[in-house]
Image (tube, grey):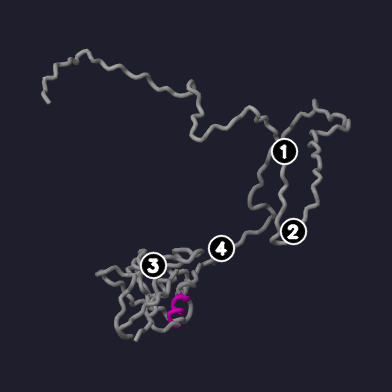
Amino acid sequence: MTSVTYAIVFNGDIVEGFDLISVKAHVAKLLRADEGKMKLLFSGKPIILKKTQDKTEAAKYGIALKKVGAKVRVKILKDKASATTPIASPVAAPKAKAPPTDFSLAPNEGPLFDPAPKVASLDIDLSKLFLGENDGSPLVEPKQVEQADIDLSEYSVAENDGSPLAESAPVVKKIEAPDFHLDIPGAILETLRETAEQLDPDTSSMSLAFPGSDLLNPDEKDQGPAPETPDTSSITLVPNTASF
């Protein structure tokens, strides 16, 4: 009989848009994980957080972790021997120590984090403090700014002859656009092509060569380097006394 086991696998990835520090804090609270387990969870290696044969429980477990930003995956493990036969983790290396699977979700009771402890109110003795009488004087003396004395006797305002202070922008000629419209979906759009004058070249003095003909004249061919004359001054001929 074949049984199905659902494994919740986590390798330290977080859901896009979540902050890593916040995700770690929520995961530590949900899984009751100490510092050692947190290093294992976010080491980058796939860890099986829980195994269950209940599909609804596996989905609930995965949704709870994804809500706090932990990017978990639910994998299906099949056991063809029996439902009670231990299932080897598919993410563990051969002959490697299996990762711990003793994680569990905290009960959904109360706030996710314990509230901050209340700070006791300070008991301050104000019996020796008193308010002074308000005589209308400011708390801070205003800053005195010395007024500048500028001589403008040599300046005058020119008469306005109607000319602009700055050159006006050139008038842009309005472009007369054609009456555009949208065609129906799937219609073949016409393309405007530039009309070009058709050429009529003179080919009366041209002829076709036979297939395999050499198209270059003798004076157009690359003759290559001139052949070198070998030095035969040290070579002598001897009589051939061999008999046949």
Vertical comparison of 174 with 66: above or below: above
List the residue tagged with mark 2: 183
- Find the distance from the CA under tag 4 to the CA under tag 2: 85 Å
* Crowding at mark 4 (Cα within 10 Å: few <14, some 14-19, many 20+): few
Q: Which mark is residue 155?
A: none
Residue at 67%, 42% (x, y): give it.
Answer: 144
Q: Position of residue 36 (x, y in %)?
A: 32, 68
Q: Are marks 3 and 2 in contact (CB under 8 Å)?
A: no
- Give residue 129's mark: 4
Residue range in magenta is: 56-64
Give the quarter of the image for residue 65: bottom left
Front label number (4 vs 2): 2
* Element type at mark 1: loop
Q: Mark 3 sits on what residue?
A: 11
When the figure is inspected, residue 71 is found, relative to residue 165, above or below; the finding is: below
> Which picture quadrant has residue 155?
top right
Indicate the position of residue 47 as horizontal and vertical percent values.
Answer: 35, 70
Q: Earlier in the sequence, mark 4 or mark 1?
A: 4
Q: Earlier in the sequence, mark 1 or mark 2?
A: 2
Q: Amino acid at mark 2?
A: Asp
Sequence-wise, the earlier of marks 4 and 2 is 4
Marker disc for residue 196: 1
Amino acid type shown at disc 4: Leu
Specify the quadrant of the image occupied by residue 157.
top right
In the rendered image, which quarter contains the C terminus? Answer: top left
Q: Main secondary structure of the magenta part?
A: helix
